[in-house]
Image (cartoon, grey):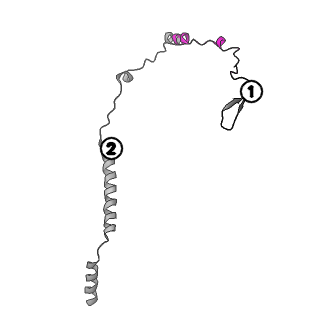
Amino acid sequence: MVFEEEFNKNMRRQKTPALVNLAIYTTITVFLWIFFDIYRALKKPLVLNIDNKTLEPVNPNLDSNLLQEINESIYFNESLFENQIPVNTETENPVSTQSGKLFNI
């Protein structure tokens, strides 16, 4: 019996270290914070700002007049690009250096 009383006195005297309590409270706080943040995000009403023009229905018929206008609006002609030879604007033979600058010989 004496042993039991001594054991009970020792058990009552030992306290949980403050860092262990702090770690437990911090862990509980982090998990609750995450839970409530997810809950708030799921319960928050979704607000969509969509332009009315985007919500208008699309015409499923192919507009051939519009296609013709697109073809006519192209003003590049293949003859503009034929026989075009690139011309060297540098004089003589440029030599590159280690710095990457070009110098004429």
Q: In the image, residue 45 lies at what x, y percent? A: 29, 38
Q: Which residue is mark 2?
A: 41
Identity, as a three-letter code, of the amino acid under mark 1: Asn
User: Is residue 46 found left or right of 96 in the rendered image?
Assistant: left
Question: Is residue 79 rendered magenta in the image?
Answer: yes
The quadrant in which residue 6 appears is bottom left
Q: Nearer the viewer, residue 22 or 66?
A: 22
Find the residue positioned furthest to the bottom.
2
- Mark 2 vs mark 1: which is more N-terminal? 2
Q: Residue at x 71, y 17 (%)?
A: 85
Residue 45 sits inside the magenta stretch? no
At a point 26% along the width and 78% down the height, the residue shown is 12
Give whichever of 31, 105 is nearer the camera. Answer: 105
- SS of the residue under disc 2: helix
- Over which residues does the magenta segment extend? 68-90
Residue 1 visible (yes or no): no
Residue 30 picture location, percent across and down: 34, 56
Quarter placement of the N terminus: bottom left
